[in-house]
């Protein structure tokens, strides 16, 4: 009887490793950037935004609308969500896009998937697609999927001609077999330390970045990302760009997730990254008790 119970216990965890949908808030029924979605943009002239919208695919009551608009040079916005790293994934999303521009402007829409820690461009469109359309791709067991990203680039080659790109996204879906995350060691100039570790309530995360020059206004944003032992993103802590050229900085993690709930006792991993997902130094393990 004891052996039967052990087999049942093991079979439960084998089956549960195959996740139905790894995306948090896939239908954008909550504000996108409060539930795992991160958005940011770059603009030389114009505006960009990411907002919930009542124009939707049929399975939810609203979608997320990305918009980039410029009348000179360019504007760019992207929206992405990290997921628990998984293999043998099926990725799917419903979308539509419309541009309002002239012959002197360019608006481009893209879907990226982070495969084996590198972003791949999986779909690109320079025209209009004014009806809800499904994009889907199946990945192999050797492909580890860890993020999906949607972006718009809007630019004008002649001042005064408006490039206005609108990208509606809904019902984002990624399923697959979840793989874990672990501490690793590589040669890196960047520095990341945690004290106390283990910790109960708060821990101080110290870091340094080697940045050339003193002008940080155009640098890619950086963040500390915290994951649980299965690889599920728990918290993102943006870093202050103005202080990157100083030798050592620190932030405090209060042991809470992105919704403000205290996380459970256990093992977590922290990684220093750009907001586009590029890892800058080895993962560090921390323990909460």
Image: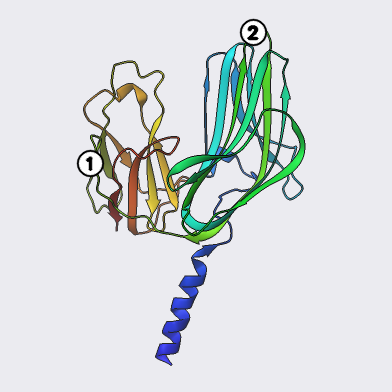
Residue 117 image-quadrant placement: top left
Q: Give the percent coordinates (x, y) of residue 282.
A: 28, 45
**Quadrant where the C terminus is found in the figure:** bottom left
Q: Which mark is residue 187?
A: 1
How far across and how far down the image is residue 221, in percent?
41, 29
Q: Position of residue 144 (x, y in %)?
A: 46, 53
Q: Residue furthest top?
A: 159
Please identify the quadrant where the N terminus is shown.
Answer: bottom left
Report helix, strand or loop for mark 2: loop
Q: Residue furthest bottom?
A: 1
Compare residues 209 and 156 and report the one nearer the observer: 156
Percent x, y of residue 195: 22, 45
Q: Residues within 10 Å of mark 2 (few under 14, many from 20)?
A: few
Give residue 177's mark: none
Q: Is 86 left or right of 50, judged from the image as shown?
A: left
Task: In the rendered structure, find residue 158 and report the number of the disc placed on it.
Answer: 2
Total number of numbered labels? 2
Left or right of 206 on screen, residue 66: right
């Amino acid at each position: 009887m004891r052996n039967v119970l052990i087999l049942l216990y093991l079979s439960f965890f084998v089956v549960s490793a195959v996740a139905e949908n790894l995306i948090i808030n896939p239908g954008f029924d909550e504000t996108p950037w409060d539930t795992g979605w991160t958005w940011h943009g770059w603009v030389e002239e114009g505006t960009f935004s990411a907002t919930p919208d009542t124009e939707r695919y049929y399975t939810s009551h609203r979608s997320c609308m990305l918009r980039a608009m410029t009348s000179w040079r360019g504007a760019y916005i992207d929206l992405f969500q990290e997921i628990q790293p998984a293999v043998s994934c099926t990725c799917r999303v419903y979308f539509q896009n419309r541009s309002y521009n002239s012959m002197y402007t360019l608006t481009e829409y893209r879907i990226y998937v982070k495969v084996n820690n590198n972003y791949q461009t999986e779909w690109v469109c320079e025209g209009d697609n004014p009806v809800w359309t499904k994009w889907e791709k199946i990945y192999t067991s050797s492909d580890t999927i860890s993020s999906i990203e949607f972006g718009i680039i809007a630019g004008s080659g002649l001042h005064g001609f408006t490039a206005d790109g609108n990208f509606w996204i809904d019902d984002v879906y990624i399923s697959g077999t979840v793989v874990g995350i672990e501490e690793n060691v590589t040669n890196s100039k960047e520095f990341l330390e945690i004290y106390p570790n283990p910790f109960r309530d708060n821990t101080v995360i110290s870091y340094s970045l080697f940045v050339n020059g003193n002008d940080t206004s155009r640098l890619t944003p950086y963040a500390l990302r915290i994951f649980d032992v299965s690889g599920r993103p728990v918290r993102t802590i943006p870093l202050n760009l103005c202080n990157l050229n100083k030798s050592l900085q620190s932030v405090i993690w209060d042991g809470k997730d992105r919704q403000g709930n205290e996380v459970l006792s256990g093992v977590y991993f922290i990684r220093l990254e750009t907001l586009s997902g590029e890892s800058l130094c080895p993962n560090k393990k921390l323990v909460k008790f």
